[in-house]
Amino acid sequence: MSRPSIHSRDPALQEAITLRPVPDILFDPQYREARKKHLDGVRHLLPAPQPIEGVLEQELLIPARDGYQVRTVTYRTCPASHNEKSEGLAAQGPLIVLFHEGGWAMGDASDEESNARLFAKELGAVCLVPEYRLAPEHPFPMGVLDCWDVLKWATENFGEIHADPTRGFVVGGSSAGANIAAVLIHQARKEKLSPRLTGQWLSAAYLLPPELVPEEYKYMYTSMWENTVDPVLPPLLKGPDGKTEGFITDMVRADVTSPLFSPFSQEWYNTTAEEQTPIPKAFFQVGGLDPLRDHSLIYQQVLENAWGTKTKLVQYDGFGHMYWANWPQLQRSQDYWRDMMSGMRWLLDKEE
């Protein structure tokens, strides 16, 4: 397999950056407000920036293992004029649990609200979006454990939220959210979570720290230092011999070898054939300029070759990390959301 080519910025992306540059990424809690201000300024351009008629949005407080109440927003279809009697009439839909982006240290449930509204409206799904605790105030693995506790709660209380996970049970997200989804897929297999997960949506995912790259895939692992023109995410390594550093170790304080951080951890990756129970099918989306590009390309290969997992991957050449969230007016952002809906239909076996 030839190594992925290095791409320059698409002219449409370059024009969008000139008109509306993203704030400098400081990987500091102070960046949260600048990030929020930037994203709030373009939120009206998202596919579903406001509540949708026929989709009920509610807040839950779901207990974590230490008693903390995880604010979680649910989205589901309901009669247009709902009341306590009519709410129970809405058909039970497949269950999708979405984890928001933000480098494990930023963001909130609103980052996934547009996607959740679309999945509920167009696919009849019930979506849960937990607002997990953030680093550095709550270092790794607190946020991941919050998400796991919400996921477990959902398997025990899906009737309460009008979901039927036997019709489909998907986890997903973008960037750090996709990382959480990927590791919880493996955690769910280990813990024999029931009902079983049936799919994973991994968008712009951080999956593979340099310390864990399998020897046979090292030739593919170049985007972490070669992709230098991504306007959102700078190169995360100085070269092929680089090690994980910066915000992941300093602010998130992640143990990059932990099974709660990477699907390539020793516990998940080096398993015997007897231990390799099926992994749910996976849908990937990634930008060609994204320093994380090769995480998705390599993990797709591993899932297909080592696990026999069905996968689909869409790559957006000339575009970088989370470009659709930062410049939603672009035609290529519209393409991303169209592909997202198509990919989720595939994960739920709802292809038209």
Image: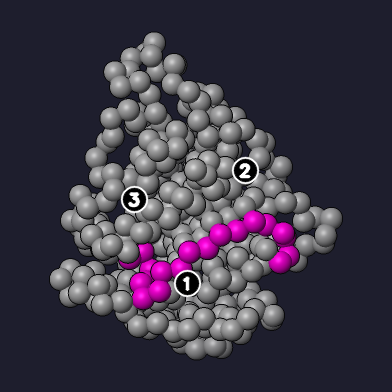
Mark 1 is surrounded, within 10 Å at the Cα level, by few (under 14), some (14 to 19) or many (20 or more) other residues, namely: many
> Looking at the image, which residue is at 26% across and 59% down?
328
**222 vs 128: above or below:** below
Mark closer to the chain start, 1 or 3: 3
Q: Are marks 3 and 2 in contact (CB under 8 Å)?
A: no
Rendered location of residue 315, percent (x, y): 46, 68
Rendered location of residue 317, percent (x, y): 40, 74
Q: Is residue 320 magenta?
A: yes
Residue that numbered label 1 is attached to? 292
Amino acid type for the residue under numbered disc 2:
Leu
Mark closer to the chain start, 3 or 2: 3
Amino acid type for the residue under numbered disc 1:
Leu
Left/right placement of residue 308 relative to residue 183 reads: right
User: Taking the image as drawn, is residue 254 in sight?
Assistant: no
Distance Cα–Cα, label 3 vs label 2:
23 Å
Tag shown at residue 197: 2
Query: What element does badge 1 sit on?
Result: loop
Rendered location of residue 196, percent (x, y): 66, 40
